């Protein structure tokens, strides 16, 4: 009986360390992030009497909004879809036309047009993962056969703070 109790206690006390070790070794642990817009929406909610659910000073609310807007310009590695890349004499006009077409066809995605001597370049989207970019990429391939997904520095948090 003592042996069973000793084994049980040893398993009980070593289990948390084994679980922690497994979490550290795994790089595919899914952690659900709380999106900042939800935080701002909670601050605006009221009860049935019209009183705010969260009561805090205006300074704290403003500080939170300032923090979130500063985070919105934070750049991290993500993905964009390269739609056009050329240095031909017609490249300036073609890139402008493609930019206009993409803005009309996909208003929910940001379109970037740039000039990196001697190339005119058009990108679309800010995607955190390559898998997120695949749906739009498959649609774009029907029209732009040279489109490809590329790594890029993107604005990590893109949400309105007001």
Image: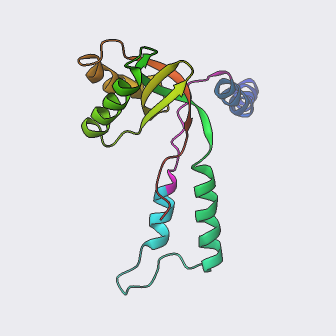
User: Which quadrant of the view contains residue 12?
Assistant: top right
Dominant SS of magenta comes to loop
Compared across the picture, whether 25 is left or right of 36 comes to right
For image coordinates 31% across by 38% down, the residue present is 103
Residue 29 in picture, x, y percent from top left: 56, 29
- From the image, which quarter does the N terminus lie in? top right
Residue 90 lies left or right of residue 59; in this view the side is left
Q: Residue at x 55, y 79 (%)?
A: 55
The front one of 159 and 2 is: 159
Can see residue 83?
Answer: no
Q: Is residue 22 left or right of residue 113?
A: right
- Which residue is located at x 36 percent, y 31 percent? 96
Residue 127: image location, x then y, percent: 46, 32
Q: Is residue 157 magenta?
A: no
Q: Nearer the viewer, residue 57 or 90?
A: 90
Which residue ends up furthest to the front in the rendered image?
Answer: 89
Q: Nearer the viewer, residue 142 or 23?
A: 142
Given the current orientation, which residue lies at the most extreme bottom position? 49
| Range covered by the magenta-colored residues | 25-36
Pick whichever, 34 or 97, lies toward us.
97
Is residue 10 shown to the viewer in this render? yes
Q: Measured from the top left, where is residue 154 in percent x and y?
A: 55, 35
Please give the name of the residue rendered at 45% of the width and 32% of the height, measured from the top-left corner: 113
């Amino acid at each position: 009986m003592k042996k069973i109790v000793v084994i049980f206690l040893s398993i009980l006390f070593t289990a948390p360390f084994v679980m922690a070790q497994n979490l550290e070794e795994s790089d595919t642990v899914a952690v659900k992030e709380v999106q900042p817009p939800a935080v701002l929406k909670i601050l605006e909610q009221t009860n049935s009497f019209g009183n705010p659910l969260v009561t805090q000073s205006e300074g704290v609310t403003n500080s939170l909004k300032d923090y979130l807007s500063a985070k919105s310009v934070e750049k991290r590695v993500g993905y964009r879809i390269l739609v056009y890349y050329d240095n031909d004499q017609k490249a300036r006009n073609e890139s402008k036309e493609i930019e206009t077409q993409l803005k009309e066809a996909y208003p929910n995605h940001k379109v970037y047009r740039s000039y990196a001597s001697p190339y005119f370049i058009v990108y679309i989207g800010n995607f955190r993962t390559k898998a997120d970019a695949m749906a739009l990429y498959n649609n774009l391939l029907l029209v732009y056969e040279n489109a490809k997904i590329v790594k890029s520095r993107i604005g990590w948090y893109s949400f309105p703070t007001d």
